[in-house]
Amino acid sequence: MKKFFPVNEPRLAGNEALYLEQCIQANEIAAGEFINKFEAEFANHLSVNYAQTVSNGTAALEVALYAAGVKAGDEVILPSFTIISCALAVLRLGAIPVVTDVSPKNLNIEANLIEKCITSNTKAIMVVHIYGHPCDMDPIKELANQYNLKIIEDCAEAHGAEYKNNLCGSLGDVSTFSFYANKHITTGEGGMVVTNSEEINSRAGFYKNLCFEKNERFHHNELGYNFRLSNIQCAVGLAQLEKFNSALEHKIICGERYRENLKDIPYFMMQNEESWAKQVYWVYCIRIRDGFPANAKEAMRLLKNEGVDTRPFFKGMHDQPALKKLGLFSDVECPITDLAYKNGFYLPSGLNISLNDIDQVCDIVESVFNKLAK
Ligand SMILES: *Cc1c(COP(=O)(O)O)cnc(C)c1O
């Protein structure tokens, strides 16, 4: 039988089972000590003051925007090339998503593109470090200072990545992570909101827990949601965090192996590593050069036939019927995003993949592209 290479898989090789057993022994499945432990260890590991668990990475973005003070009618600038979670979080608060195109080199949002979108209603910039590669933050921070904007940093794909030796997650006013099963650490479903600001942290805790008032518990001045993460999930998260360094090391070794193996194939580009970046290869990306006789869809289909599982790149927010129906983005053009969507996909990048697997995948990639080129 042909070997199958899954695009992504979690790795549960530490204290997960032990800590889950402890939750059950203690009869603590909802609230419990693993929540505080996971939050404290996570804050410590990023060297930030506060970390607040939430139920997933999408909720984390909504909580972060609320906590940063984004309100109905405010504009939030974000990249078109991202997951819909980013635009959804803005919309859920009644705020207005304003999207920009991205850098053709690293597929991230950039200061010069952001600046063109700033109006008197702009309240925040949501940066998304895409596919494990950090954004160029210094010029973005300069803009934020100049126009008095908050920076929300979506680190779901960049856990462990660094910008000029500073970890992603410590570069904005408030930063978010996802612990979905394909992320660097997982709790099944889960997320985190981190910040150095006591006020932002306290607003995040308020919003994720139904906006209970401190003095009169069942009296509500604002509408919040239940975005809590359970003790069971935090038990898994703590075990995962203990193995974070080895997981990250594996990601980087795998990414470098792919880069080395594929560097002489002329038909596609790989993700550049910019001078400011330590990238972490959350997934291993390929962009077919424009003019090549096949697009991503066709290449992915042939790879699947050979047992190589892949995923397409994001389709831009400016091109989403669900968002356009709301009257958004009617005159927005994002050619780089469109081209990335047409030509981009990523290769098996899970935490259980071996270097030998990668060598086999690369051989298949090479033969599929040679075939398509003819
Ligand atoms: C995975 C991801 C999210 C959403 O996280 P969920 O936990 O799946 O809700 C948000 N932003 C980016 C960039 C992601 O990759």
Image (cartoon, rainbow, N blue to C red):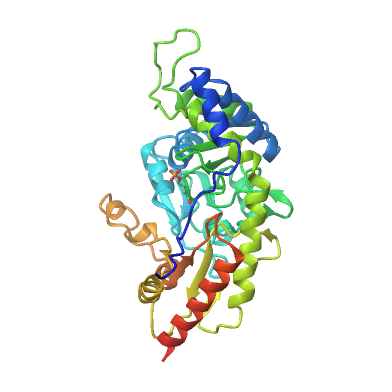
Residue drawn 56% across the image and 26% down it: 35
Specify the quadrant that holds the N terminus: bottom left
Q: Can residue 136 be seen here?
A: no
- Work out which residue is located at the far left of the displayed protein and give it: 325
Residue at the bottom extreme of this rendering? 374
The C terminus lies in quadrant:
bottom left
Q: Quadrant of residue 139?
A: bottom right
Q: Work out whether 162 lies above or below 344.
A: above
Residue name at image x 45 percent, y 39 percent: 189
Using residue 255 as the reference point, say whether residue 330 is left or right of it: left
Q: Is residue 297 above or below residue 53?
A: below
Percent of width and height locating residue 125: 53, 47
Tell me: residue 99, above or below residue 106: above
Asked if 271 appears above or below 280 in the picture, the reply is below
Residue 234 visible to an observer of this rendering? yes
> Is 162 left, or right, of 345 in this rendering?
right
**What residue appears at the point 43 percent right and 55 percent down from the top-left corner?**
99
Give the residue at the far right of this rendering. Answer: 165
Nearest to the observer: residue 345 or residue 111: 345
Residue 119 or residue 208, whichever sits in front: 208
- Disc tally is 0
Residue 49: percent from the left, percent from the top? 67, 31
In this rendered view, identify the residue nearer to me: 337 or 362: 362
Q: Where, by quadrant of the figure, is residue 303 drawn?
A: bottom left
Q: Residue extending furthest top?
A: 216
Residue 94 lies, in percent from the top left, at: 36, 38
Quarter of the image for residue 351 reads bottom right
Q: x, y percentage for residue 248? A: 64, 52
The residue drawn where x is 45% and y is 23% is: 209
